[in-house]
Amino acid sequence: MSDTVKSPITGSANVKKIDELNEDFFVKNYQQKYGLNVTRFFSEHKKIGVYQCLDSNYIFYYPFVVGDSAFYEDLEKFDWYYKTEKWDYDFSEKYIKVGSEVLEIGSGFGFFLKKLRAKNCITESVELNQSAAKKLEEQGFTVHCTAFEDFSAANPDKKYDYICAFQLMEHIPNVGDFLSLYAKHLKPGGKLIIGVPNNKSILLSYKSNTLNLPPHHAGLWSEEFFQKIPVLFPDYTLEGVHYEPIDLNKRIKSGVFYSKEKHASKSAGFFLSLPLNLFKGLSADSKNISMHIIGILIKK
């Protein structure tokens, strides 16, 4: 229990500390893997705790350390960071009905909006990144270059058939506030589609996957958290949680990962343990390998 750290979902102190990481861990990982200097983000916080909200199963980092525009501009230089095609997009585009009114939060360069345009959907975007917002405008999309909280305050009566947020919610500290605001902007029966990394995936373990750490991510999502949302936010019912399909390559990667967890790469122990761990990866529950999940919540 903690009497100082409060859940970003409930505001309650009913949380437990499950880990603690120091500044050197973050700085070393980002430097070695991506050549990024993140020292400035930890000048005031030398240690970051990993906490679980016991009411919601949500896992979050605290104190909150979030990336600035320069940090994301550095990540945008990697061609894999903004993918034109994602499982999230393909799954959700097929799910959304033709001609629907859709609000996307954090549209990036508009890859998903283009799919919706082909279905004659009426779309709007809330995009905080000015350069991305400019590109959206150039493509003829309606975009609000502002924080979602400010958009909501300025447009209290706007309601949509769908609100979509892909690879966004894991970056946000105040998750509970966003869930409440989303409900206000959905029509009765409207649907909230959230795509996030799957915290249960062995391939996304925060101790080995740098981009699952601050200042990139603020929290870790799971199916267990999605299941708790309707309990804590009674405006919603949960339609379901969907897992990104996995292939043989992902299973092999997970087996290699199991060996790396215990042994240094290219060591004798690594190679000796590899056959057993490859079998472990091949036989593992796909939910523990799948790297992304989509939760769909319905507004009552």
Image (cartoon, rainbow, N blue to C red):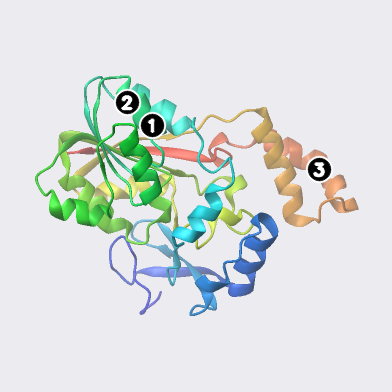
Q: Mark 1 points at which residue?
A: 112
In this view, the mark in front (3 or 2): 2
Q: Is residue 221 toward the left or the right of residue 264 in the image?
A: left
Question: Local crowd at mark 2 within 10 Å, few (<14), some, or many (≥20)?
Answer: many
| Residue 280: % across, % down | 70, 39
Tell me which residue sits at (28%, 63%) in the image: 10
Task: Find residue 116 and name its label.
Answer: 2
Give the residue type at disc 3.
Leu
Q: Does residue 38 appear in the picture of this structure?
A: yes
Q: Is residue 255 toward the left or the right of residue 125 in the image?
A: right
Task: Find residue 248 and name its label.
Answer: none
Q: Is mark 1 on a helix, strand or loop?
A: helix
Q: Earlier in the sequence, mark 3 or mark 1?
A: 1
Q: In this view, does 200 lie above or below 44?
A: above
Tell me which residue sits at (32%, 61%) in the image: 174
Q: In this view, does 261 lie above or below 4?
A: above
Give the residue type at disc 1.
Phe
Q: Residue furthest front?
A: 138
Do the CB atoms of the residues marked 3 and 2 lie less than 8 Å apart? no
Q: Is residue 203 toward the left or the right of residue 185 in the image?
A: right
Do the CB atoms of the residues marked 1 and 2 lie less than 8 Å apart? yes
Tell me which residue sits at (65%, 35%) in the image: 250
Tell me which residue sits at (42%, 52%) in the image: 170
Q: In this view, does 135 lie above or below 64?
A: above
Quadrant in the picture for residue 19: bottom right
Task: Find residue 274 and name its label.
Answer: 3
| Residue 77: % across, % down | 57, 48
Give the residue type at disc 2.
Leu
Q: Which of 200 and 76 is in front in this view?
A: 76
In this view, the mark in front (3 or 1): 1
Q: Is residue 283 toward the left or the right of residue 240 in the image?
A: right
Q: Nearer the viewer, residue 262 or 150?
A: 150
